[in-house]
Image (cartoon, rainbow, N blue to C red):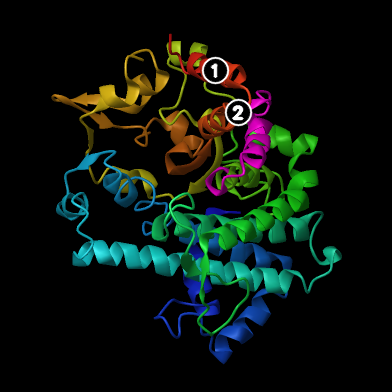
Amino acid sequence: MPIIVMKKIKFIIPLLFVLLMGCNDWLSIDPKSEIDADVLFETPEGFSIALNGIYTNLSSTQMYGKEMKNTFLDVIARMYTLNHPTYEVIETYDYTNQEAKGIIERIWSVSYNSIANCNAILERVDQKESSFFPEAGKNMVKGEALSLRALLYFDLLRLFAPAPVVADQAAIPYYDKLSNKPMPYRKTSEILSLIIADLKQSKELQREFDTSEQAVADFKSTQRFSYSKGFFGSGRRVMRMGYYATTALLAQVALYAGDNALALENAMEFVDNPELIDFTSSDKIESNGYDRLLSEDIIFSLYNQEFEESFDEHNFLIANVDDIFGSDGDDFRRQCYLKNLGDQQQLAKFTLSEDMYREAQIPFTIPMFRLGMMYHIAIETMFDSDPQGALQLFTQMRTKRGCK
């Protein structure tokens, strides 16, 4: 969809649906909003606007466009040191700090706002016949809404509830339809089961379209981040929660839930298919023909035209590079992602000012799922039953990354 349309969504969507205001009225809708929603969903394009509004929410600085990608979460994980007073406080885990509390509250509110929008789409799409949409449009809309809701709930669980291996207790409220009533908190295991069910349904809904010859060719294209064929076309599916993004998410959720067989099955769809997706080749690295993001192995990404600018606001300093890479001095990522800054190294993988990459819109790309994640899931879930096979996969991944 053209970017100019996506910019309008920021103003349209908050008027149409919901805004998290507090515990008791966080999903309330006034009559005017419902009328607007009726108008919006009169056309297939209305569904595309609503879905793109969710992607825009997710790409915002409150979410994966900054805090949930390379600042707040990475700081509390001690991945980087940021030269900013707010993140210096966050690094000490002082969540009583007002700025830290504000970041956390915005993540919660934008997530549940987006979930409510997913529920609104799911409610309306089931009221439409398949003929209302172009080609496989109904399955596409429903599948993406299911997967987006699953993604949001999964990350809310990981942020605000103990891991299931630690405790299976009331975790977060779960909404599968629009409601102005507070919902009870549900157990982590229950929510994970619901997420997995949504992802399985989404895969089946989107499988036929996204695995077609043309869709696969577009998914592999060097212009896959920039070449659009319209919302209901096969272009830029790498930036949508389509079949492949859903498969990658299902592998992650299944691993978290302890279903190793399901996790392995979904991860291997990528590991066993280098014709679909593979790591950047050594030839491109050696000839300097790569983009710093090493974008060839991205399975799913979001998009924000201000992402590179937001990243450049801070120096992401890494003092423990050797702890990360060990003795793997030949690892391509060490060469491509970092640059020297005094006695430390600075993360530079999102700084992509070269014209050739800007034309492909790679600087605006927010990587969400990568092939490396699928390898690690496959290795971990295979090890108990086939340690030799797991070792072979591990060696294969290291070799593809230039490690010797």
Q: Nearer the viewer, residue 90 or 12?
A: 90
Query: Residue 283, image x and y in percent?
Result: 51, 11
State the quadrant of the N terminus: bottom right
Asked whether residue 13 is in view, the answer is: yes
State the residue at coordinates (79%, 38%). 212
Spatial CA distance of label 2 from label 1 is 9 Å
Query: Residue 115, image x and y in percent?
Result: 54, 67
- Judge whether 44 appears above or below 86 on screen: below
State the residue at coordinates (66%, 38%). 261
State the residue at coordinates (21%, 49%). 91
Three-letter amino acid code of the residue under disc 2: Met
Q: With 285 as the anchor, is 127 left or right in this view?
A: right
Q: With 74 as the anchor, is 381 left or right in this view?
A: right
Considering every residue shown, the one lying at the far bottom of the view is 31
- Judge whether 126 appears above or below 334 on screen: below
Q: Mark 2 points at which residue?
A: 382
- Judge whether 30 appears above or below 402 on screen: below
Give the mark nearer the N terminus: 2 vs 1. 2
Q: Does the magenta stretch include residue 297?
A: no
Query: Residue 2, image x and y in percent?
Result: 58, 54
Magenta residues (range): 255-276
Marking on residue 197: none
Three-letter amino acid code of the residue under disc 1: Leu
Q: Mark 1 points at which residue?
A: 391
State the residue at coordinates (72%, 35%). 216
Q: Quadrant of residue 358?
A: top left
Q: Does the magenta stretch include residue 259?
A: yes
